Amino acid sequence: TEWAWHPCPTCSTKQATDYSALLAFGTATDGTTPLPFIRVNDCSLNKIFGVSTYVSLLFVVVAIYLINWFQMRRAVELDEAVQTTQDYSIKIKNPPPNAKKTTDWKSFFEQKFKSSNLHVNAVTIVLNNATLLKPLIQRQKLLGQLQNML
């Protein structure tokens, strides 16, 4: 690295304590006036440095994008490899008000999808469970926070 000392007319002696490695003072020919000098880097950067920096930045951006893409693809593959109840669940948004027996729903689904050889293993009916779900969701959040603290 090439360094050079240049005159610094705006530098003061107060700054000398904070920037002692970069500031130096000489005396004028009259012997009374301090002349401040600042140490500057005289290295010149060529065009190759700029191009290599730009190419490196471009490489990092592309690499981050590709890593994100591969992670998303892998997450989908892992999700599809694990079967959960959500994969086989049906949510009925507007059931009749008197449809509260699980046996009725089971026979309805088996009859409705008879051509596809459907077998219904279990039917669960949940009505107006918002008051139960809110504390359950809060519990799950708190358990997750506790697990992250460990």
Image: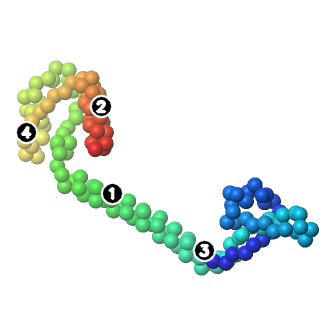
Q: Dot 1: few (<14), some (14–19), or many (≥20) neighbours within 10 Å?
A: few
Cα separation, mark 2 vs mark 1, equals 28 Å
Callout 3 crowding tier (Cα within 10 Å): few <14, some 14–19, many ≥20? few
Residue occupying image coordinates x 15% and y 23%: 99
**Residue pictured at 33% horizontal, 62% vertical:** 70
Query: Do the CB atoms of the residues marked 3 and 2 lie less than 8 Å apart?
Result: no
Task: Please give the name of the residue rendered at 22% of the width and 32% of the height, measured from the top-left corner.
Answer: 92
- Mark 4 lies on a secondary structure that is loop
In terms of sequence position, does the residue under pointer 4 or pointer 3 come before the other? 3
Q: Check contact, mark 2 vs mark 1: CB within 8 A.
A: no
Amino acid on which the number 4 mark rests in the picture? Asn
Instruction: Give residue 136's position: percent from left, percent from top.
Output: 25, 30
As drawn, which residue projects farthest toward the top?
A: 98
Contact check, label 3 and label 1, Cβ < 8 Å: no
Task: Decide which of tag 4 and tag 1 comes sooner along the chain.
Answer: 1
Q: Hey, which quadrant is residue 100 in on the image? A: top left
- How has the structure been colored for display? rainbow
Q: CA distance from mark 4 to mark 3?
A: 66 Å
- Which badge, 3 or 1, is on the more N-terminal residue? 3
Q: Is residue 30 above or below residue 2?
A: above
| Amino acid type assigned to the residue bearing label 2 in the image | Gln
Locate the N terminus and report the quarter of the image it occupies. Answer: bottom right
Residue kind at label 3, given as amino acid type: Gly
Q: Which mark is residue 72?
A: 1
Image quarter of residue 118: top left
The residue mark sitting in front, 4 or 2, is: 2
Q: Earlier in the sequence, mark 2 or mark 1?
A: 1
Identify which amino acid the numbered label 1 is placed on.
Met
Is residue 74 visible from the viewing direction of this image?
A: yes
Q: Which residue is mark 2?
A: 138
Residue 121: assigned label: 4
